Amino acid sequence: MNQRKPTEPLVTRVDVKFGEMVFRNRPAPSDDRATVWLDRYGHYHHLTEQVPVGGVAGYRALFLVDTSVHIRELQFQLPSREQAFFFQAKVSARWRVTDPVEAAKTHLTDADPVLRPHLERVLRDVSAAFPIEEGTAAERAIAAAFAPRRKQSVAQGLSVLECDATLSLDSATAGYIRKRVEKARTHEITKEDLARAGVEQSARQHLDALRDEHKIQLERMRQQHELEMRHMRVRFYNSAMAEDPNNVLAMLLADDPGRANEVMAMLLKQKQVQWDGAQGLLGTMLEHGLVNRSDVAGIIDNATSVITDSMAEAPVRLTPAPASLPLPGNRTDEPLTAEVVADAPARPLDPLRFDEEFDEDDEDDWQ
């Protein structure tokens, strides 16, 4: 592998002199040099072996072609995708003559006039596909374009074997690109922050909506439960009152024993209402002659026993106790009063009795 000097020609022409090359001075081909002979008819012959003794008789000239591998260092200004910015490229190319006959025909002396335009054209096509900030990717693409398996044939028998490029930026372009990269990075960070904030806000809104819906469901369930309990209590009280009206008072007393006086007052008021109703009904019946005198004593006894049995459930003392049923004309509208006796045993009331002798004069008093 040689770094060829510009003054050294790639192809050297040697005129054939019959007297000198018949027995001696017959150049032999090697790995780094090829021999191309030009016969008298103008045909070129690439010989891979030394011409035998006396074999030069039919040739006019000999071309010694340099076929060794050479390295050429070049510099280019390559465009980027934006076309306004350029890569500063340092190129190292490996090349050699792969067609000695073509090199001899075209009298190749220097590879630069052929090699440089070809390399620049290929490199520009590759670099123009990349933005200015992606120089590393452009370098890899250039190396792949000149891979050894992709040997590129150039004019005059030359071939490019491999090419490596190092891309850089001038100071002004580098400063501009640095600012642009920082701006793009800041934009990406801001966009990510906004996206994250949007996701968090959406999650909070969804959570708040779930929480509100849960509260509404709980409130609805609570109201439904209260309504069901109210209906259940109504059905329970209706059932209890259907069996016995006093069951409601018993439940009140069981829930709050401190309401005993209130419960007793309610019982006494209820009995007083019953007593007043019975007394008024009996007076009305007597007034209109709906009952006989003989039935009055039985009705009084029955009413007295019913009321006495009801009042016997709670120790009470009626004050004042009536001695006899008052006459309709002299009856009073004042309600009976009762006093709760906590320690006194329950005592039935004495039944009310009329005198056995009830004459017609007494009937006038009732009327």
Image: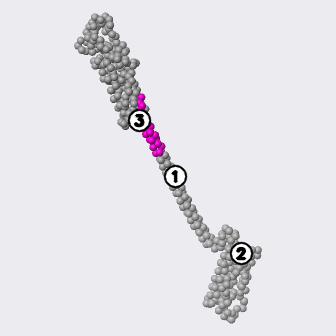
Q: Earlier in the sequence, mark 2 or mark 3?
A: 3
Q: Amino acid at mark 3?
A: Thr
Q: Which residues are magenta?
A: 166-191
Q: Position of residue 365 (x, y in %)?
A: 67, 93
Q: Please, what secondary structure does the residue beneath circle 1 have? A: helix
Residue to which mark 3 is pinned? 173
**Magenta residue check for 151:** no
Residue type, mark 1 in image: Arg
Quarter of the C terminus within the rendering: bottom right
Q: Earlier in the sequence, mark 3 or mark 1?
A: 3
Question: Which residue does the image show at 39% across and 36% down from the upper left?
Answer: 131
Residue 309, image x and y in percent? 70, 77
Q: How many marks?
A: 3
Residue that mark 1 sits on: 204
Few, some or many C-alpha atoms within 10 Å of disc 2 (few <14, some 14-19, many ≥20)?
some
What is the distance, in whole Å, between disc 2 and disc 1 at their CAs? 66 Å
Pick whichever, 3 or 194, lies toward us: 3
Using the numbered discs, state the Cα–Cα distance from disc 2 to disc 3 in whole angstroms: 111 Å
Circle 2 is placed at which residue position? 314
Residue at x-position 60% and y-position 67%:
233
Residue at image x 58%, y 67%? 230
Q: Quadrant of residue 175?
A: top left
Q: What crowding class fits label 3: few (fewer than 14 Cα within 10 Å), some (14-19), or many (20 or more)?
A: some
Q: Is residue 174 visible?
A: yes
Q: Quick one: 182 or 215, which is closer to the camera? A: 182
Q: Is residue 171 magenta?
A: yes
Q: Which type of secondary structure does the marked residue at label 3 adopt? A: helix
Q: Going by the image, does 253 lie left or right of 75?
A: right
Q: Is residue 198 above or below residue 107?
A: below
Question: Marks 2 and 3: which is nearer the front?
Answer: 3
